[in-house]
Image (spheres, grey):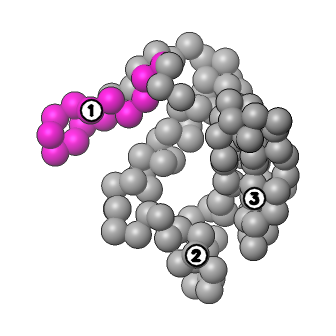
Amino acid sequence: MLEILKTYSNGGVIEVYRQVDREASDYKNVFASCEYFAQQGKRTVITPRFSETIGNPDYHTIYATLKGTPCNVGRFYAKRHIYNRINVEKQNITEVFIRSENGLEVLYSKGEG
C-alpha cells in the first residue's frame, strides 16, 4: 500500500500511498513539503486526496490516525498550505494563529519544524 520514494542518511524518508495521483496539479508542491521534513530526518507520508478515499476499502488504514479528531483534518490541510507557501513559493512566514474553543492558538511557528 505504501511505496518508499526517497530515503536520507539521517533516517528521513518520503513514502507515498499507491492511490496518490502523481499527475495532480499539487503533487510537486506536496512532494517538496515532504522533502523539506525528510531532509531533517522526519518520516513523511503522501496520502491521497481525502475525497478520493471515500468508499475505498483502504480508507480506514490510510486515515486511521485521524479517527476521532475532526478538527485535525482541517489543521493538516492548513499546515500543508503553510509549508507549500514557505518551501515552494518562498514566502517568509513566521507564525500562523487559528481561532479555537480556547481562543487563539498557534498553528505554525517558525523553528518548530
Q: Which residue lies under the disc numbered 3?
A: 16
SS for tag 3? Answer: strand
Residue found at x 56% / y 13%: 92
Picture coordinates of residue 6, whole percent (x, y): 84, 46
Picture coordinates of residue 54, whole percent (x, y): 56, 78
User: Of the residues under marks 3 and 2, which one precedes in the sequence?
Assistant: 3
**Quadrant of the image occupied by residue 4:** bottom right
Which mark is on residue 105? Answer: 1
Q: Camera-side residue: 111 or 52?
A: 111
Indicate whether 30 appears above or below 70: above
**Quadrant of the image occupied by residue 98:** top left
Q: Is residue 94 magenta?
A: no
SS for tag 2? Answer: helix
Q: Are marks 2 and 1 in contact (CB under 8 Å)?
A: no
SS for tag 1? Answer: strand
Q: Which residue lies under the disc numbered 2?
A: 61
Magenta-drawn segment: 98-110
Indicate whether 91 appears above or below 10: above
Residue found at x 75% / y 34%: 10
Q: Is residue 107 magenta?
A: yes
Asked if residue 38 can be seen in this view, the reply is no
| Amino acid type at mark 2 | Thr
Badge 3 crowding class, 10 Å Cα cut-off, few under 14, some 14 to 19, many 20 or more, is many
Asked if residue 6 can be seen in this view, the reply is yes
3D distance between C-alphas at marks 3 and 2: 13 Å
**Quadrant of the image occupied by residue 87:** top right
3D distance between C-alphas at marks 1 and 3: 30 Å
Picture coordinates of residue 68, whole percent (x, y): 34, 68
Badge 2 crowding class, 10 Å Cα cut-off, few under 14, some 14 to 19, many 20 or more, is few
Q: Is residue 15 left or right of residue 80?
A: right
Q: Are marks 1 and 3 in contact (CB under 8 Å)?
A: no
Residue at the extreme left: 102
